[in-house]
Image (spheres, grey):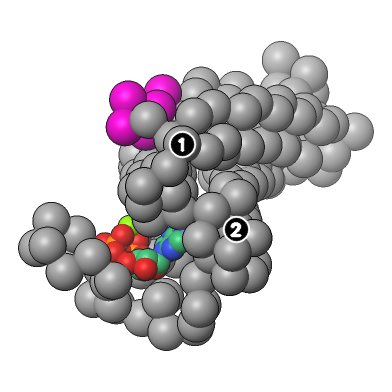
Amino acid sequence: MKDKINGTNRIEMTFQNLPENERIGRTLAAAFASVLDPSMEELSDFKTAVSEAVTNAIIHAYPETQGDIIMVFERENNVVRVHIRDFGVGIADVKKSMEPLYTTLESGERSGMGFTFMEAFTDHVEVESELGKGTSVSLTKKMGGEKWNKPVN
Ligand SMILES: Nc1ncnc2c1ncn2[C@@H]1O[C@H](COP(=O)(O)OP(=O)(O)O)[C@@H](O)[C@H]1O
Ligand SMILES: [Mg+2]
């Protein structure tokens, strides 16, 4: 049974920067990872991380315009990687933006903890950004724990 999910998978989609797509992105992340039979905690952590990245692309990348967000899911054996890419304003200082509590939306609505959660809830976070060109966030997470600690065919 498990042998069938050795190998790779890839799904790519484009969606608009609409608030309702945060929930869709989060649900798709869970669906994509579910083949690995992750624990509830792994799944919930992965969903939270993805939803933080998608929310950022929706609310920060395009403050006053419509824009596309590309989401790519990739799986190699029991490692899942998701890329969330926008073509919006970009981030001036990526390192600073990833510090806990750092936010440029001072409305009180944002906590500045998005990147911190992404780092806490996945194995690896990569951010590439260019002002005026957009941002790409990649999250990598190994899931399925013990069930996968056996040789790959
Ligand atoms: N996709 C993005 N496009 C532009 N800016 C972004 C993007 N993602 C994050 N940022 C910047 O990084 C900051 C920190 O993000 P985050 O840790 O998620 O905190 P929050 O979303 O609560 O502000 C944001 O306030 C914003 O300035
Ligand atoms: Mg955020």
Q: Secondary structure at mark 1?
A: loop
Image coordinates for residue 65, horizontal then vertical, percent? 43, 42
Residue 38 place in picture, x, y as percent: 49, 34
Q: How many marks?
A: 2
Q: Quadrant of residue 77?
A: top right
Height in image: 46 above or below 89? above
Q: Is residue 32 magenta?
A: no
> For the residue with label 1, is its CB less than 8 Å from the closest atom of ligand 1?
no
Amino acid beneath label 2? Gly
Q: Disc 2, disc 1: CB below 8 Å?
A: no
Provide residue 135's location: percent of width, then percent of height: 58, 59
The correct choice, above or below, for 110 with respect to 69 in the image is below
Q: Nearer the viewer, residue 1 or 11?
A: 11
**Magenta-highlighted residues:** 19-24
Determine the residue located farthest toward the top in the rendered image.
1
- Answer yes or no: is residue 137 visible: no
Give the vertical position of 99 relative to 21 (above or below): below
Looking at the image, tell me whether mark 2 or mark 1 is earlier in sequence order: 1
Percent position of residue 96, x then y: 42, 84
Image quadrant of ligand 1 equals bottom left
Q: Which residue is rendered at x = 36% and y = 51% of the image?
A: 63
Q: Residue furthest right?
A: 153
